[in-house]
Image (cartoon, coloured by chain):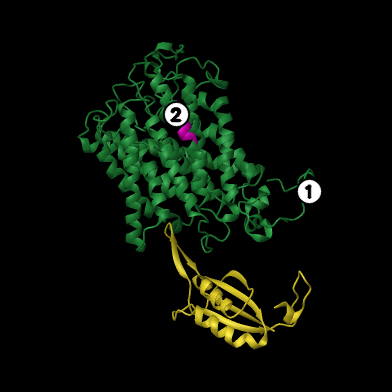
Chain colours: A yellow, B green
């Protein structure tokens, strides 16, 4: 099992979710996050005082999948999230040791 | 509030207000205006509340609401009589203490009093409330609640009531219209450019200096957390201000109508002036700038409202909006933390408005006034003399308010520190000082479990706020 984590532009969330559903993904977790990469923040002016907003809002998607599906799902996310402009985000994959479905107690691949 | 009766007698005579002198139209309008002006303090709470950081929101709102509570009492006990009784130059007497003898005329109004004295109490109360409330903008995020309550209690009696007497009462030394109708010293402050705005601005500066800078200012970013609140507050202030300015005629007539139109006109052009200044300085006009400009226009037209023409108001508002958009940077140059720009908006705007009377006042709007410099004012007390009187009145209120406020603030400091401890400031005053928070931040709090409840148990003993 692997966990795919994608940090993408907020308005791309629906496209990514649709692309994953087409490939059979049955659940995922979404969180609102902030950060910076090569895309920097912006400045705002309030009553003459300049404020630098360093962190850009992004959406983070976490989904746990079986090893076989990782490559095509990562490709699907990248495809769906890309605009070609700076700030499109990142996708990374980490190993998962164990997984339990809370309601039934099913474990690992049965719980995906 | 001026009137021309020659009162040569030395001792003031109190007489019951004749029932037939009461004008029901005027009374209805002033009672309505009183309600309008009272709304301005909650409006101010939101105007300021949106400009502070989220963790201090309730502290700001509470300071403003508490001021309504405090001054509503001090005014009827002692404030009103000190402001509006007797014939003293500097202070009223005790005739109306506890609102005794309230069936009597206000001596300075005499034959010009068209409303019951109790109605006048109500109207002036709302001014006495909002003036100390304005100070909370310059002292945001660092004043302990207990000392704040003590401050407003003392200030509303010792500073506000005398200044109101000086300027608003016909016997006051800055408003000698009653004693010397041939006209000597007569500063024209229609609705409180000096009494309310310069007074609050100078006091705000004094307390900002006594309290010191907010922790982290000016390096740390402290942008307001809710600009829509600021615009909501500004809109409600604009609405309430029609009672403030048009109501200050103390009648329902042509001058009140002119004050209404002048108020709206100057507010509109100040809004535009501020937006233009921002565009020139930063390349962008902002919503916060629109709200700030509107309030600046309301401030500047306050002393002018019943004296100037709508065309004059166009200039007064625009100048105030444009200049104050730059004046808010004074605090950065001189390094005082006037957190929400009470000095830049109310003090500077109040001065601009008070001096504008000297240029724009016209008998065409109000025959009781004098012609200003731009209307060919000459004679004893029009033209340049009027401008001089305006300058002296503004200066006198500035000095008295700044020094008096500093003394009050420093005395309170000896008894209990005004300034909150540093860790309260970091945590947020809402939770540290009042044990509540403005916003419920999300799923962890709202999904049903918010920690353990101790309903019925006494609250945890907090530090003495």
Q: For the stretch drawn in magenta, what is the main secondary structure? A: helix
Q: What stretch of residues is rendered in magenta?
A: B31-38
Where in the figure is residue B91, as x and y percent of width and height?
Answer: 48, 26
Q: Nearer the viewer, residue B58 or B104?
A: B58
Q: Chain of mark 2?
A: B
Say if residue B229 shows up in the picture.
yes
| Rendered image: mark on residue A19 | none
From the viewer's perspective, is residue B134 above or below residue A80? above
Which residue position holds label 2? B32
Q: Earlier in the sequence, mark 2 or mark 1?
A: 2
Where in the figure is residue B319, as x and y percent of width and height?
Answer: 31, 48
Q: Residue at x 42, y 39 (%)?
A: B239
Find out whether residue B407 is within the magenta segment: no
Q: Classify residue B267 as left or right of residue B431.
A: left
Residue A107, picture quadrant: bottom right
Find out whether residue B37 is within the magenta segment: yes
Q: Classify residue B434 as left or right of residue A108.
A: left
Question: Marks 2 and 1, Cα distance to the nearest angstrom?
Answer: 45 Å
Q: Residue at x 61, y 38 (%)?
A: B150
Q: Residue at x 46, y 13 (%)?
A: B14
Which residue position holds label 1? B454
How many C-alpha atoms fall within 10 Å of the one at disc 1: few (<14), some, or many (≥20)? Answer: few
Mark 1 falls on what kind of element? Answer: loop
Q: Chain of mark 1?
A: B
């Amino acid at each position: 099992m692997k966990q795919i984590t994608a940090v993408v532009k907020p308005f791309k969330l629906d496209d990514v979710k649709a692309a994953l559903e087409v490939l059979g993904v049955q659940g995922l977790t979404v969180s609102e996050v902030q950060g910076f990469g090569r895309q920097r923040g912006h400045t705002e002016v309030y009553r003459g005082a300049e404020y630098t907003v360093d962190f850009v809002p992004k959406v983070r998607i976490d989904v746990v999948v079986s090893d076989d599906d990782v490559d095509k799902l990562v490709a699907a996310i990248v495809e769906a999230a890309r605009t070609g402009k700076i700030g499109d985000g990142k996708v990374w994959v980490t190993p998962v040791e164990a997984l339990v479905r809370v309601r039934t107690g099913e474990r690992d691949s049965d719980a995906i | 509030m001026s009137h021309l009766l020659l009162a040569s007698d030395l001792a003031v005579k109190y007489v019951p207000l004749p029932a037939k002198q009461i004008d029901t139209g005027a009374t209805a309008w002033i009672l309505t205006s009183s309600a309008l002006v009272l709304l301005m303090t909650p409006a101010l709470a939101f105007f300021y509340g949106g400009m502070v950081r989220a963790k201090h929101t309730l502290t700001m709102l509470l300071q403003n609401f508490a001021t309504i509570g405090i001054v509503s009492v001090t005014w009827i006990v002692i404030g009103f009589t000190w402001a509006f009784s007797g014939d003293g130059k500097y202070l009223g007497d005790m005739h109306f203490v506890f609102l005794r003898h309230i069936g009597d005329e206000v001596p300075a109004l005499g034959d010009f009093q068209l409303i019951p004295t109790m109605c006048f109490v109500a109207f002036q109360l709302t001014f006495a409330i909002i003036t100390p409330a304005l100070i909370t903008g310059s002292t945001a995020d660092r004043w302990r609640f207990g000392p704040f309550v003590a401050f407003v209690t003392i200030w509303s009696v010792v500073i506000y009531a005398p200044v109101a007497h000086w300027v608003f009462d016909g016997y006051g030394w800055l408003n000698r219209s009653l004693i010397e109708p041939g006209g000597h010293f007569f500063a024209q402050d229609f609705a409180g450019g000096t009494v309310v705005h310069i007074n609050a601005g100078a006091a705000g500066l004094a307390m900002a200096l006594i309290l010191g800078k907010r922790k982290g200012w000016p390096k740390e970013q402290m942008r307001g957390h809710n600009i829509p609140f600021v615009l909501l507050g500004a809109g409600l202030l604009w609405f309430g201000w029609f009672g403030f300015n048009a109501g200050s005629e103390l009648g329902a007539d042509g001058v009140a109508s002119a004050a209404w139109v002048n108020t709206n006109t100057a507010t509109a052009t100040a809004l535009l002036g501020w937006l233009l200044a921002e565009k020139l300085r930063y390349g962008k006009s902002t919503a916060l700038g629109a709200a700030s400009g509107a309030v600046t226009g309301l401030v500047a037209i306050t002393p002018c409202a019943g004296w100037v023409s709508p065309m004059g108001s166009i200039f007064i508002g625009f100048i105030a909006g444009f200049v104050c958009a730059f004046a808010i940077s004074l605090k950065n140059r001189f390094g005082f933390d006037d957190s929400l720009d009470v000095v830049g908006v109310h003090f500077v705007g109040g001065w601009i408005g008070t001096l504008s009377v000297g240029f724009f006042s016209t008998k065409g709007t109000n025959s009781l006034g004098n012609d200003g410099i731009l209307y060919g004012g000459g004679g004893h007390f029009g033209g340049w003399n009027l401008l001089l009187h305006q300058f002296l009145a503004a200066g006198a209120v500035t000095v008295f308010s700044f020094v008096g406020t500093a003394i009050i603030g420093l005395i309170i400091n000896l008894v209990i520190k005004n300034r909150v401890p540093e860790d309260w400031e970091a945590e947020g005053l809402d939770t540290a000082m009042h044990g509540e928070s403005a916003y419920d931040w999300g799923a962890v709090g709202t999904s049903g479990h918010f920690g353990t409840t101790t309903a019925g148990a006494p609250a945890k003993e907090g530090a003495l706020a």
